[in-house]
Structures are given as structure tokens and as C-alpha cells.
Image (spheres, rainbow, N blue to C red):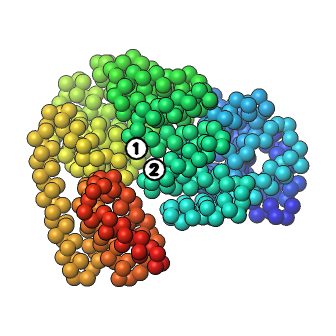
Amino acid sequence: MQEYSDLSVLVIDPNQHMRRGLHNMLSQLGITRIEHGVSAGTAIRHLEKKAFDLVFCEYDLGNEHGQDGQQLLEDLRHHKLISPSTIFIMLTTEGVYSKVVSAAELTPTDYILKPFTVDVLAQRIARAVDRRAALLPIHQTIERDRLRDAILASEVAAAANPRYATECARLRAEAHAALGELAQAQAIYREILETRPLGWAQLGLARCQFHLGQFAETLDTLQHLIDDNPKYMAAYDLMARTQQALGQPAEARAALEAAVSISPHMVRRLRHLGQVALQEGDLDAAEKTFKQVVAKSKYSEFRDPEDHVNLVRTMVQKGDASAAANALRDLERSARSGPATDACRAFSAALLQELNGNAEAAHAELAAAVRAAGEAGTLSSAMKLSLAENCLQQGMDEQGMQLLDALAGDPASGVSESDTAAVYERTGRAELAQNEGDSVERYLDGLVRQAAARSGQGDQRGAIDVLQVAVRRRPENAGLISALASAMLRLMGDSGWESALGEQCAALLIRMRKADPHHPMLAALSSQYVTLRGKQ
């Protein structure tokens, strides 16, 4: 078994006897680089320090907070602590396997049913290593953000390894979706579903429909998925998001409550349920849910100080200053230090001071929260929007506009100009939105002139850099997108094809087609792109 000697392995099991038994079996197969984790927390700390080729995880982790091996896997994938190429094998009993195998979107590489022999273990490892080798070129290109290459690699891998053709198709569909090519992704998912009613393909199709704004079709696809797999948790989450998009908060809440009744320990889902209850104005339900979120996250490696802000906000809306103060003290005691925690502490304190009628102290805390938010890379856009809205409500226009301006100018924030305009509208400050809009337009006009000057001087890369700033501010402006795509194509026409730049340009043309399918430059730019790519 010398071929396995280079594999690094992490064994996650709370049972010392089981860990020792698996360790001995792995040693018989020539695997000696083995480390142990006795819980989800210790496993996460191992994975934060180093990568492992293979992870064996017991499904029943015996966690007092209820997290099982499947939920740990979802956390690891969500927080990118394991790469797509990591082999993750779940150890479980036949009874548990029959309940979970069809219900999870993020499935392990394999399941091994207990008890098992060394021969069974060797067969499963061999199969997993073979699969990883077949899919590794696709995973590597995805990790390098070369999605066009990943699509090609998936086609090559499917032809070379027909037994993994379905998995290759899944990766190809996900790459198309990430590039914004939702029609192509939909076609792949539909083709898969014609052969087998796979849950992940139904969910992938529903996600494409959701991002295309086809909300009725999304709900129909998700309902079929839930009918087939009533415990497919991710379907309920997307159903709730779809119903929120349709302005149906009660239906969204019902979908999340149904999911929580099946799987009560997933913190992200509970958090979403609490937010929907708070938006509906059901403060008792919001309080109950946010208390659960805080309690379940308290000993988690992924605890989020924003959960305490949500709890404090709920208590403040209920007028319960004492409970809000207790939640704030718990945040100060339990959260890790850092800019995000500082922002959440100050924001929570501002809400409490406002409830107590201390306007001056509330303003001081809000100002501190804004300063910390500017340094907090992990603070969510939703929390920053809420902080900005509170600033505007308190007459702190400069701080509120500063936050909204930064969010609108950051493409990674997911915040559009219409989102910031809605904040101005809700706070009765529409005139600020108009002033801000006029100021931004003057700023963008200046950037376009600056880009034209650089282009005229032969500095095409400089022009591209400037136009990228403009497009970040107006991501749906077809004119700005056209100018940026044109500058990229001009550079590649002069200097030769560049894969990274070519991918960016393709994504821009897709956005341009969505923003204005009849734009007079679209056809010419698309033709130029195809010609240049063909010469590479």
C-alpha cells in the first residue's frame, strides 16, 4: 500500500476506541500521517492550521449543541476550510445513512457503514483517490478562478472518465452559473434531470431560475424537490429567499420554520428565521430565535458578533432595556476582539443608549461603530446597511452617507444603488440620495475623462484600472461596461490574449447583454471578443 504513504489524514470521532481502531486500519494500509480530532471544534482548529488530503468523520459527533458530521461538513465548505478536492468520508450506521444520503446538498465523497473491515476501507480509499485524480484538474482551475478553463477541463475529464461524467457536468454547470451564464447552466441541470431526479440538480436549476427572476418557476422546482426529498434542507432555504423576493414574508417564515423543525441546529438557518420574524414585527419569535442562535454559537469556532446585535435590536424594539443590556454584556464577554466585534459592540451600545434617551452617548457610540466598520472586513453588508440607516435616523448624515457610498462602490458587497436609495427613502432623506447621486455622476464623468486621457497616451492598463472603478460604482451601466470591455479588447488586440483579462471581458459582455440587450456596441464587441479568443 505504498501508494498511500503520502496521504495526510484527519480522523474526527469523539470515541477514543473508534479513533484508535481506524488509526490501526489506516496504518495497515501504509498511511502514517494521521491526526485526530475529538469534536467539530478541534477538527476546525486542525483544518485552520493545515490542509489534509483525506478526512474521516463520524456522523454522530456527540455534540451537546447538536451539530452532526453533515453540519460540520457544510460549515467547512461554507467557510472554505477544506478544498473541493479534499476527500471527506463519513462514517455512519446503515440506519442513519438511509435518512441522510438523499437529503444533503453538500454530500461527502463517500459513506462507510459501520462496522467495516480493512478491505472495505482500502476499497473506499482507492475509489476516492481515483475520483480525486480524475476531478483534480477541474478543481485546480476553479480554485485559481479560471472558470473558462474549468469548463473545458470538465469536458475533457468526462470524456476520459465516463464514470464521473455526472460530477463533471455538475462542476461545469456551477462554473457557467458563476460566470453568469445561467441559460447554459440550466440546460446542463435539465439534461441531468432527464436521466435521474438528483436533488442537487433540481436545486441547481432552481438557483438559476431564482437569479433570472423566474420566481414562480423557482417555487415549482423547489416544491418538486421537497416532495421527492422532504429533508433536503437547502431547498427550504432557497424557498424562503424566493418568497421574500415575492414580498411574502409569512410564507418565507413558514418555509424556514418547517426546515428548523427537521434540522434545528443549523445556525445560519436559525439566523435567517430570526431576521424574517423581526421584519414581520413578531418580536417574541425573533427574540426566541436569536437567543437560540447566540446560545448555539457561543462555543462555535464560527460565532458571529452580529447575532448579539440582532438580539439587542429585538430587545430595544420591545423596549426591554434590561434584557438588551444583558445581551450587550454577553457580547463583550464572549466575542473575540477585532474590528467586527468593536463595530457590533458600539452599534449595540448605541441602540441601548437611544432607548434610554441618551442621544449624545448614542451618537458617540454610532460614530465609533462607523469607524470600526470601516476596518472590519468580516462585517456583513446587511449590518453596514442597518448601521447606515440608524445614522441617518439620528441625523448623522455624513457617517450614514459614508457607509452607503462605500457599500455602493464595492462590487463584492452585493449592495446596489437601489438598495442604498431604499435606505434614504425609509429614513425620509430622499434629498440626500439625489445629492449623492448627482455627486457620484460628476465623479464618474471625471473617471471616464481620465480613462480616455490615459488611453490617448497609450496607457491602456491605466485606462482599464480607472474604468473598473467606475463600473464598480455603476455595475449595471451598459455604457460604462461597454467602455471597459472595449479597453480590455483593445489591450489584448495590441498585446495578445490574456486568459484572466479574457474571462473578465466575457463576464462584462454577459452583464452588458443583461443590462441592455440592444446596446449598439454589444454585437461589435462580442464579435471582436470571439475573434481575439480564436487567435490565442
Find numbered disc 1 in the image and state the secondary structure of the residue it sits on.
loop
Asked if the residues shown at circle 2 and circle 1 are in contact, with their CB atoms under 8 angstroms apart, the answer is yes
- Image height check: is 246 above or below 516? above
| Residue 477 visible in rendering | yes
Q: Which amino acid does the dot numbered 1 rest on?
A: Leu
- Alpha-carbon neighbours of circle 2 within 10 Å: few (<14), some, or many (≥20)? many
| Residue 364 visible in rendering | no
In this picture, residue 190 sits left or right of residue 426: right
Total labels: the figure holds: 2
Q: Which residue is mark 2?
A: 182
Residue drawn 54% across the image and 66% down it: 149
Q: Quadrant of residue 151?
A: bottom right
Q: Quadrant of residue 455?
A: bottom left
For the residues labelled 2 and 1, the Cα–Cα distance comes to 8 Å
Q: Which residue is mark 1?
A: 212
Residue drawn 37% across the image and 25% down it: 248
